[in-house]
Image: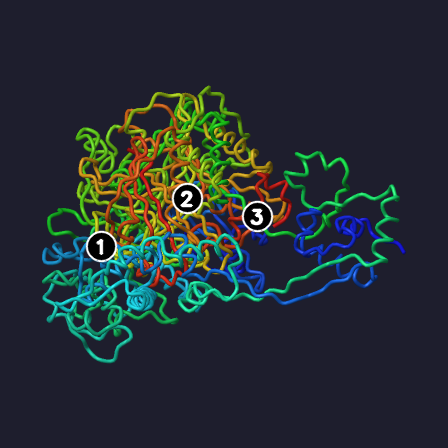
Amino acid sequence: MVNVDSTLNDLNSYLKKPLSIEQLRETLFKMGFDLDSDSDDSDALKMDITADRPDLISTAGVARALNAYLGHQKGIPKVDVKRQSAYQLVVEKSVQPVRPFTAAFVVKNIHLTEEMVKEIIWVQEKIHDTFARQRKKAAIGIYPLKKIHWPIKFTGEAPEKIKFVPLGAKEEMSGSELLQKHPTGQKYAHLLRHHSIYPVFRDAKGNVLSMPPIINSRDVGQVALDDHDLFVEVSGHYWPTLSTIADILAHLFFDMKGDVYSVEVKYPDEKSPRVTPELGRQSFALDVELVNNTLGTPFTAEQISELLSRMMYDVPKMNPKQLTVEAPSFRADLLHPLDVVDDVARAYGFENLKPIPVELYTRGGVLPQTQFNEDVRDCMAGLGFHEVMTWTLTSHEHHFTVFEREETPHVRLGVVKEQGLTMVRNMLYPETIRALLANRSQPQPFRLFELDQIVDIHEPEDTGTKTHYKLCMILGHASATFDEMKGNVDALGRFLGSTAVFSPVEMSGFISGRTAHVKMGQLNGFAGEMHPRVLNRLGIPFPLLVFECYLTH
Amino acid sequence: MTNLPVEHIVLDSLEKGKEHILHSLVEKTGLSSDSIRRIVGGLEEKGLIKVVREKVADWVLTQSGKKAVQQGYLPEEYIYGILVTVKHLLLEQLLKKFTLLAVKHGSTETEASKEFAAAFGLCKRKGFIQRIQNGGFALTPLGEKGLNNSSEKKVLEAIARGEIPPLNSPIVSELSARGLIAQKMRTNEIVQLTEKGVEEKKRGKTSASIQREVGPITLSLLASGEWKKVSFKPYDVATGVETRYPGRIHPLRQTIRDVRKSMVELGFREMEGPLVESAFWNMDAMFIPQDHPAREVQDTFYLPGMAVLPDADLVKRVKAIHEHGGKTGSRGFGYEWDPKMAMQMLLRTHTTATTFRELGKGLHPPEKRFSIGRIYRNEAMDATHLSEFYQVEGFVAGKGLTLRHLMGIVKEFCGKWGLTQIKFKPTYNPYTEPSMEALAYHPGLKRWVEIINSGMFRAESLKPFGIDVPIIAWGFGLERLAVLLHQKNTLREILGPDVSLDFIRNYPGITHTLMEKGGK
């Protein structure tokens, strides 16, 4: 989800017909978005947009969609693009290895207010963080037009050769210095660091406009309130994404009442320049049957066409069986005709679709392992034990060292956000005991059990691991003895229809002579009395008996 | 004078002119010793009996004495046992062997050395052992005879049996000096009827309404038929007693059972999958693009190592579909699909990975399947965020399924939990289209809550598996439901080692719907 912060006044200034907060909430809900209520300031809006709609990351963008949805501005939203031959941008071969593409356009006669400037900067950052994947896929640069001498060059140069005063600094820096000293440079250094050449926009006089994806030049690249003409570029590695973002921005500035002028972008191996913003249309062949079979509706082609017009689609052609639909270029989420079907449903209103029961006959059931597990749980409860559920993720320190266990094969974790987690458990009792430790002050006796999964290393599996179910029993109280534990294990054995066979075994962390390997039919496990060294380390003041066995073969 | 029935029972048990030890009345009357004391005190006050109290000293066994009787050995007999076999030993060796034996029989080392000192001294004094030429000690002929079946042992055993030894016996003094017996002072209470008591007793016998009152019923009371002649002491039935805790299933596990039951009742068959997954099954197979934010370390627990990809043809189809849509009618993502990314290993982030593994095993529609399992998010844990939690997921595969059927099955499931007011909202999932959120009106909280996420699996994810029927799927995090059902505030109160044992021991065992609960 992406937050769009705005005000009701602002939004209404873009709407053909103003809305109240409640009407807005209702309409956003039907469209598939949310309005968080802000009770203090009745004018402030927090709108939640889903991650698949970068075109809605602005007040103007949401207004655009609302105007269509409410029927005031149906079809593909228009942008008048003017042309001026002077606006040329040359992409040189030198930049292609490091940042091959750029799309650009010019905005003129825009009347900027403080709110608009704030919104433009906010939109730029939000798109950077979400759709552009932290500037990895694309980066946006916005500059005042007046200081730029055309044509603009997009080249790749040695980092030391690129020298300019970046935004937010007082002194000139080289490309490499920028990555080391400037905060924005440090944040995005990883995107350029491994290259020997850095990209740079220079105007005809050789002045640096910016070094994408890092930062603009302070002299040429800072937009002020009295600027009414702007240059906008989007650079990156993947043309479709750049073009989409350029289109989104073109719509934004157009809706802000600026005049949009295209820029010719000349690529080294291409005969004719690409004219941006492209504002192309995506075409789909939509079968009426597909719509009705998916939604369970009886729509005609006309009805579908009407519904789609409220979702910003044009329908240039249709017959009773199929529609040819066109969607705006900023709908990057449309990959398959079914994506269009989803829009038909949203326009119609999900609340208008009546649920129908599924009438397929199938037999329900649980897995044999599940039934077995539940039976064992019932037996344990019958023996007076209480079930605990602990974490499967733990630390080596706790899972092995504290209990004096030798490290046995286990799954290690990679990078984690939660401190102290380093592995997935391959045994239950060190984790089950955590429940006892956390509940030390509760009345004794402690008769705890856990029946859940652990992960073992097992090469033949595709992941090299196998998830198993295990049972663990813990007895802890002033007069707990091995015999008491053995009695419970025997009872479990009988419940499972076999005899528990105990044979002496040595296990580190357990008292020698009071530990046994246990075999119950096909299931293997152990039982033992915890060594006072471990009890002492854990601060447990009474004897502790442990039993653990596999519940899968 | 009015007397209580119990007082008459005691009076009846006393014979005129005879002295009775107070303690013997317990057995005679069947009343508890506390009751007897109370009643005797009362009778004494009324002048019906007189009580003479004298202090008496009894000989009783000490711990060491009890041990000796239990084992059947006195410490000097160890010395006999050692020397009869080895013939002669130096003092240190004798002490060492003695200590070993004593410890084996349950003494500590300190106790053993004390016992040795006493036993050795005794043996020397009585001439049972002597020093020999090489400096060691050996049994004397007297010792060989005398250390077997000593008179000390006989007296000790007699005292153990409760017999009173003869006064001023030297053996008793010896045993006392050795710390095997000790004197215990006791107050002997002798009860006797007074003249007045004899009168009362006579009078009481004519009263027909006497009935003995009995507390806990004994086996002999039942067997003897005495129960016919007694009345039963009323208990205070409202009084508090010691708390008992029946063994319990974990409250979250109970919720899991209830959810499982709901699913089975709707005709769903359970499935399960591993906790450790490959990115292929967790993401690629369901058409989540390789550059999707959810794939980053931000949200996912990646593990070192590489998984093995499944069937090469399947992988080829998935690759084609990601890159340009393959034969699905989609335009794909337009990037180059990297098999290495699909081979990354991780802890599954949703049970949908398991669903797709099942699809990989072959589907025979119509099918309804479900799973309840642990999933992982690489998040820092706080009151509302857990690194691992449970998810429930179900899908229906069959010809002719539509979005309205999905709404239908979601509604039906919610209805089982008392949530009958449901509304649907469009939403976005990378692997379903259309996607919906179901919100339910919670009667207790008096507001709409997001309950279930659902959608129709994208054609791009089904085609590689050769599935040509629609699959509608839905799921939810289990903890949300559990928090509402068990009236808790945070997830950590429901799952994990910090969950209060008090809660596990005491949560109400009756399953209920949210509607019935009414409360929070």
* Disc 1 from disc 2: Cα separation: 73 Å
**Circle 3: is it few (<14), some (14-19), or many (20+) Cα within 10 Å?**
few
Q: Which is nearer the N-term, disc 1 or disc 2? A: 1
Label 1 sits on what residue type? Val
Determine whether A21 is above or below A224 in the image. Answer: above
| Camera-side residue of B364 and A414 | A414
Marks 2 and 3 belong to one chain: yes
Q: Residue furthest top?
A: A361
Give the x, y percent position of residue B236: 73, 50
Q: Nearer the viewer, mark 2 or mark 3?
A: 3
Q: Give the residue displayed 18% in from the left and 47% down from the top.
A: B305
Residue A186 in picture, x, y percent from top left: 23, 68
Pinpoint the chain carrying mark 2: B
Sequence-wise, which precedes: disc 2 or disc 3?
Answer: 3
Depth-wise, is mark 1 or mark 3 nearer the camera? 1
C-alpha distance separating marks 2 and 3: 31 Å
Crowding around mark 1 (Cα neighbors within 10 Å: few <14, some 14 to 19, many 20+) is some
Q: What numbered label is drawn on residue B84?
A: 1
Amino acid carrying label 3: it is: Arg
What residue sits right under mark 3 in the picture? B244
Q: Give the x, y percent position of residue A548.
A: 33, 43
Q: Are marks 1 and 2 on the same chain?
A: yes
Q: Residue furthest right?
A: B1
Q: Residues within 10 Å of mark 2 (few under 14, many from 20)?
A: some
- Residue topped by disc 2: B390
Q: Give the quadrant of residue A465.
A: top left
Where is residue B428? Give x, y as percent: 41, 43
- The kind of residue tagged 2 is Tyr
A43 or B78: nearer the viewer: B78
Q: Are circles 1 and 2 on residues that touch, CB within 8 Å?
A: no
Residue at 49% x, 27% y is B266
Which secondary structure, mark 2?
Answer: strand
